[in-house]
Image (spheres, grey):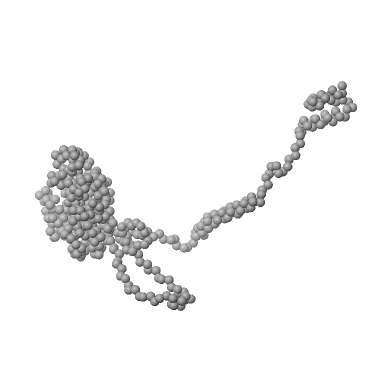
Amino acid sequence: MSVSCHLLFTHSPDIRLPPFKGCAFSERRQKDLEKRKYYGRKIKRTKNLYRRRKTAGQKVFGTVMLVVAASAIAFLGFCVGKPLLDYLGSIGTDSPAQEWTPAASYMQRQGEPERTGDVAAETDYGVPAVDHAEPETANSGSAEAAAVTEPPVTAVPEQTTTAPLLIPVSDGTLISTEVPSAALANRSSLAAVITKAKNSGYNSAVVQLKDSNGNFRYRSSIPGVSGSDLVTGTMTLDEIMSVFAENGVVPVVKLAVLRDEEGCALFTDMSYKCLDDPSVSWLEAGQRRWANPESDSLREYFAKIIAELKDAGFQEIILTDVMFPDFQPYDTEWIPAKYFAADRYKMLYNVVRAGNIIEMKASDVIGGTYGRSAEVLNDISMLHDNSVALVISREDLPTEAGYPADAKTLAETVLAQAAKKTFGLNVIPVIDGAGFDDSEKSKIVSVLSELGYESYIVVQ
């Protein structure tokens, strides 16, 4: 009986049997089972099981990174802290503030054109720079050696340098006369006219470099124009500018724009085209071609002309013939109807921006509606900062039409009416020589002075 009980207990430790009285083994076994039930098996753990030991290389690397981080923090603190301390230290000091030096004004720049490339290697107006630095001298210890080894220096004669070209520019006041086309024949002829103008009290002179036929009165270098029949002048732009510069007279260029017979004959894409055959240019009654203000070729053409003038230093540019042809009713059969529309003046926007002065006849400005040369005044926003060169001519303002015969009164009447039609634009009166003698021109000039006009042009 005792043997069977022992086997059952051994195979089933969770079964609790009442101990046999007087059996010490059974009591100890029972206590041991109870301890295992509540506390489980004891496991011994070592420290290295959960913490990896660092190698010597890792310790060195960590130290280096710590030093680098500390150095970076110190450098950043110096960069930020030093300017801050300097600023805080300057507050309340009596040292004067550093003055701001403004950029050179328009007059100080003397009309210098925009430049590209190595500007530091050149002085103003494209003259090569001259090095004025003093040569380095040897110290006293090597002076004797230099005297023995170096050959004697031969004296070099002084070289004369040409003074830079000072391009005259306008200060906003143009008291001009017009240069006759014959004066552009050669340098001496032009110099005589410009010198006379200066001695007569004019500070500027108008020279027409592209006429109403489309001819260039100077030797242009534009591809397609250079060497063609369009060029009738012999002087280059630089030669013309040098004559003005030597006399201190401001050059004012006049360019005919849309009346361009010869140019449209050579560059046919600029002209008006017929409806039935776009390859054929439209001709007005006088068998003349006109440039179309909508033509992309015209815009490119004039962009090259303006760029050529600007490169030579010309700043003041008058545009004339900024108008449409005198279309006839039957022309509607040959060209699109848009050229007869009331808002056609918007097409002229592509042209007026080429210059800064637009020439208009006084008779076109003060009429009932804006006439041909004044059509751009239908939209004053088109002109931006453009000035109006207002041509006063007795031929355009006949006395029998109600205008005064007296030149002085005529000028007063015309300018008063024009002021109402130009909406505050800057007006430069042009006294046309046709119909006015020298005495009458003097009277008109006095009227301009009385009315506050500072700029004017006198055509001889």
Please identify the quadrant where the C terminus is shown: bottom left
Residue at x 14% of width, y 50% of height: 396
Which residue sits furthest top? 1
Q: In this view, does 315 lie to the left or right of 11?
A: left
Total numbered circles:
0
Q: Which residue lies furthest to the left in this view?
A: 400
Camera-side residue: 337 or 237?
Answer: 237
Front residue (pair 199, 5): 5
| Residue 144 on image: x %, y % | 46, 78
Image vertical order of residue 73 relative to residue 152, above or below: above
Q: Which residue is drawn at 14% across and 58% down?
A: 440
Residue 398 image position (x, y, % from top left)? 11, 50
Please give the name of the residue rendered at 11% of the width and 53% of the height, measured from the top-left corner.
405
- Residue 315 visible? The answer is no
Q: Where is residue 28 in the image (x, y as percent from the top left)?
A: 84, 31
Left or right, residue 399 beside residue 373: left
Q: In which quarter of the image is residue 316?
A: bottom left
Q: Which residue is drawn at 79% across and 32% down?
A: 35
* Residue 138 against residue 32 in the figure, above or below: below
Quarter containing the N terminus: top right
Q: Can residue 346 be seen in this view?
A: yes
Could you say which is closer to the camera, residue 424 or residue 228?
A: 228
Horizontal and vertical percent position of residue 143: 45, 76
* Residue nearest the viewer, comparing 75 with 171: 75
Looking at the picture, does residue 141 appear above or below residue 67?
below
